[in-house]
Amino acid sequence: MTGQVVTRFAPSPTGYLHIGGARTALFNWLYARGRGGKFLLRIEDTDRERSTPEATAAILQGLDWLGLDHDGDVISQFEGAKRHAEVAHELLDAGKAYKCFATQDEIAAFRDEARANGTSTMYRSPWRDADASTHPEAPYVVRIKAPLDGVTVIRDQVQGDVTIRNDQLDDMVLLRSDGTPVYMLAVVVDDHDMGVTHVIRGDDHLNNAARQMMIYTAMGWDVPVWAHIPLIHGADGKKLSKRHGALGAQEYQAMGYPAAGMRNYLARLGWSHGDDEFFDDAQAKEWFDFGGIGKSPARFDTKKLENLCGQHFAVMDDAALLQELQAFLQSIGEPALTEAKINDLASAVYCLKDKAKIFPSFLEKAQFILADRPIVPDDKALKNLDMVSRGILKELTPHLQNASWSRDGLEAVTNSFAEDKEIKFGKMAGPLRAALAGRTATPSVFDMMLVLGRDETIARLTDAAEFNAQAEGG
């Protein structure tokens, strides 16, 4: 197949964007973007009872968080129902489909008898070759005429050639008795009309490909390149489900995973490029191809996800990180940080992101810059502010007031002070963390001092001694 590559992601808006769906979208996005092609989005909203605007919004928000931008407008499958029906009538007029007047009761009776006799329950309609003059004035469905002999070969880029005997294919219904098109018809017509060249989807759709190929062949349309990817399993080897924890893309955003880390992890979930684990979007677009997709289900591993997210935090552009932090806060219903706090945070990002894996841990370490005086230590930090520790801080403070405010200068002063007092620096670190941040998990005390500046650092050390003295006195 030549020409521009066109892929699509076609979710049903009956719930949130499942993480498996997010990976399918990512694979389509990578394949198209890496080849200068188009990535299209279609909402398969033909199930009117289960499709909701809220679910559509959740899907769009999930894709937006993951940074999977699509080309053109979002296509609604439901809005194309008239076009889908036109194709069915075109096949009817060409003698490649037929009107079937069999009732549901007749079909059920046939299947009951077949089960009792141990024969195939696949329904063969007596109306397939009936003369139009024998047609009754009664409701009917439109069925496609499946080939009766030979084989259909699905040339799949992941699964290899899959051969299905044509006598195993039924005369699939195209239009229901009320004239509405079925999903299987709508998918094919939409993919053809949208110019989709490559259909990349879960391997639970593999059997559908043979039935959909009947429509392509009957209409004389080009069959797209198929690539059916294995599903995602949980760590226990079973199909990923609610029992494995969070499933929706937005839930992972709300847990604080950075989008770049999630993209990297999802790309590696069932696809590989040599031994490469950590890579950026540009590399993924360049490398991604069908040859790297495995045939076995991938297992979702939260520890691997967190490890990759940590690596992405370390290299993330500071401004982009802070922008995504604001989006994270919005996703959990927290107010956005003020411009002043963002500016303060910008000066501290360098010492916050190196060991962060998710935004909550990043924010926990950032408390020293986000909190305002007086700093109120949490219970764990308060244990580091006993009378002896406060005495150490009180004696250290004058030395810091006269120190050169650089890392070397601050380290020299504190190390010299520790030697004079014959104590290890570790004995001072806990009280300093408690005084400066009110926490035990913080950046290094020297980084906090440098970010806070001389005046704020001295003020917090002074506050710590006075605050706790009052607490003990009370």
Image: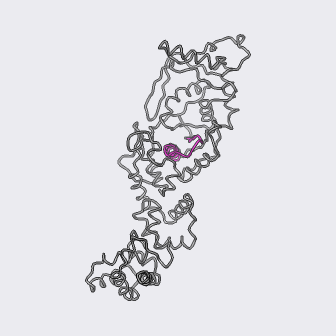
Q: Which region shows up in magenta?
A: 7-34
Q: Between residue 280 and residue 466, name the one nearer to us.
A: 466
Q: Residue at x 47, y 23 (%)?
A: 164
**Residue 130 % position (x, y):** 66, 11
Q: Is residue 137 above or below residue 153?
A: above
Residue 221, located in which quarter of the rendered image? top right
Q: Residue at x 49, y 79 (%)?
A: 374
- Name the residue at the right extreme: 137
Tell me if residue 338 is in the magenta stretch.
no
Q: How is the image coloured?
A: one colour
Q: Is residue 396 above or below residue 7?
A: below
- Name the residue at the left extreme: 422
* Image quarter (top left, top right, bottom left or bottom right) of the C terminus: bottom left
Residue 330, located in which quarter of the rendered image? bottom right
- Please indicate whether residue 19 sits to the left or right of residue 445 in the image: right
**Residue 56 % position (x, y):** 61, 46
Residue 89, located in which quarter of the rendered image? top right
